[in-house]
Amino acid sequence: MSISALDEKKELENKVSELIRLDKSAIKSLSTLKVKQKKEKDDLDKKHTEQYKKLVFYLHNKKTKEEEGENNKKLEREMKEADEFADQTALVEQNKKDEDEAERISRIARVMDNKKKRSKSKRHSDSSEELSEEN
């Protein structure tokens, strides 16, 4: 073997070892890059998940508040109707009491009128009897 062949062989070995070293370096760099990309992807996924959760929470709260508002309006309406019904019931009961009281008073007045008529008629008949006895 000549010197130039030996030099070429050494040069070739140096290039191969350099390529292997570069290949190992490239593999290490690729591994590092993959790890970084995975971390960035996980961070991005986490961020998107948090944003999605916030959005769902916001929409749920908005819907809940709307339903709560509707329920409050419905409750107020029902309470108003219940109050009106209670007022009407009280008015009906008061009217019935007033009618019963008027009926009672009219019965008392009739009884009193009947007593007055009887006593007048008794007085009249007593005075008639006295007149007839005197005659």
Image (cartoon, grey):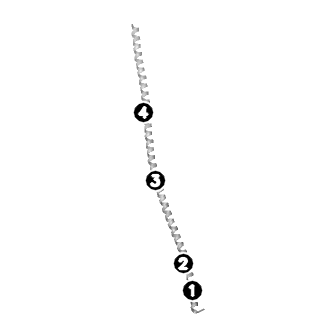
The residue depicted at 44 percent of the width and 48 percent of the height is 73
**Type of the residue with mark 2:** Ala
The location of residue 84, given as percent across then percent down, is 43, 40
Q: Do labels 3 and 4 touch, CB within 8 Å?
A: no
Q: Residue at x 42, y 30 (%)?
A: 99
Q: Position of residue 66 (x, y in %)?
A: 45, 52
How many marks the image carries: the answer is 4
Q: Earlier in the sequence, mark 2 or mark 3?
A: 2
Locate residue 105, reporting x and y percent: 42, 27
Query: Which residue position holds label 2?
Result: 26
The residue drawn where x is 57% and y is 86% is 12
User: For the residue carrying disc 4, how many other residues have a C-alpha within 10 Å: few (<14), some (14-19), or many (20+)?
Assistant: few
Please tell me which residue lies in front, 78 or 29.
Answer: 29
Numbered label attached to residue 65? 3
Q: Alpha-carbon neighbours of circle 2 within 10 Å: few (<14), some, or many (≥20)?
A: few
Distance in Å between CA atoms under marks 1 and 2: 20 Å
Camera-side residue of 85 and 63:
63
Furthest residue toward bottom: 3
- Amino acid type of the residue that numbered disc 1 sits on in the rendered structure: Leu
Residue at mark 4 to residue at mark 1: CA–CA distance: 120 Å
Mark closer to the chain start, 3 or 4 = 3
The correct choice, above or below, for 16 with respect to 74 in the image is: below
Q: Quadrant of residue 83?
A: top left
Image quadrant assignment for residue 28: bottom right
Q: Which residue matches tag 4?
A: 95
Q: Under tag 3, what secondary structure?
A: helix
**Nearer the observer, disc 2 or disc 3?**
2
